Amino acid sequence: DKEELDEKLANRVQVSKRAVAKVIQAFDRLMQRNEKITLALKGELDGDEAPNVDEVIRQANIETQAENRNLLALNTSLHKKYHTISLKMAELQERVTCKETEAAELLNRVDDLQYELAKVTSRNDKLENHLAEAIEKVKTYQQIHGDEKGVVKPVVTTTVSQKKMEELQKEIEEVRELANNRLQELDKLHTQHREALK
């Protein structure tokens, strides 16, 4: 968009330069005619037969009217080009503004996702620590009560502990899946943000 805008501005400068050159040429021709008329009025034109003053003025008037028509057409053309370029520039500026707004929204979304991901990661770490502690407690219990008589009690306790561990592991997997989803969404937003800045 920026390159397109720069190109439009460069074209506009070139058009303006050509228009100014045409105006300067027209001004030079007018100056030459005025000088010719002045010399004719003074009777100082070169040549064996100096043209009649009325004829010089009439011819100058014809040329001036033709030049006026050309300048009017040029002026109208420049106004149209200026209007077209102005509309295009306004459109490009609006697109740039939309892209900037979109980029800002994406940045805010990225910040939100990063914050949420940090919370999920922290929760995941706590759950993993909790699971590790539970496993250590089970191992310790089995070491202490493993040789005791009566199989029912240790088996029940171990079963309960195992169930607790399974629940924790399931919760950890859910948190990991949520974290992975957030990471994928974050990567997608980063990609969209880079595209929006192009």
Image: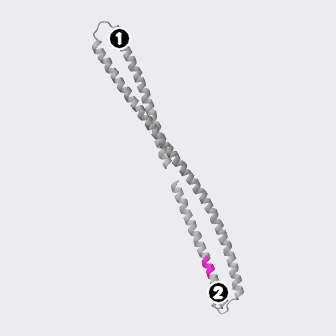
Mark 1: few/some/many CA within 10 Å (<14, 14-19, 20+): few
Residue 137 numbered mark, or none:
none
Q: Residue at x 41, y 21 (%)?
A: 167
Q: Quadrant of residue 49?
A: bottom right
The magenta-colored residue range is 27-31
Identify whether 42 is placed above or below 71: below
Q: Residue at x 37, y 16 (%)?
A: 161
Residue tagged 2: 38
Magenta stretch prevailing secondary structure: helix
Mark 2: few/some/many CA within 10 Å (<14, 14-19, 20+): some
Residue tagged 1: 155
Q: Residue at x 63, y 64 (%)?
A: 79
* Side (left or right) of 128 relative to 24: left
Please check the rendered image and state whether residue 28 is part of the magenta-colored stretch, yes or no: yes
* Side (left or right) of 97 relative to 118: right
Please check the rendered image and state whether residue 47 is part of the magenta-colored stretch, yes or no: no
Query: Under tag 2, what secondary structure?
Result: helix
Residue 6, position in %: x, y? Answer: 52, 59
User: Is the image coloured rainbow, by chain, by secondary structure, or in one colour?
Assistant: one colour
Question: What amino acid type should be assigned to the residue bearing mark 1?
Answer: Val
* Residue 165 seen from this side: yes
Residue at the top extreme of this rendering: 150
Residue 103, position in %: x, y? Answer: 50, 46
Q: Quadrant of residue 93?
A: bottom right
* Side (left or right) of 57 relative to 2: right
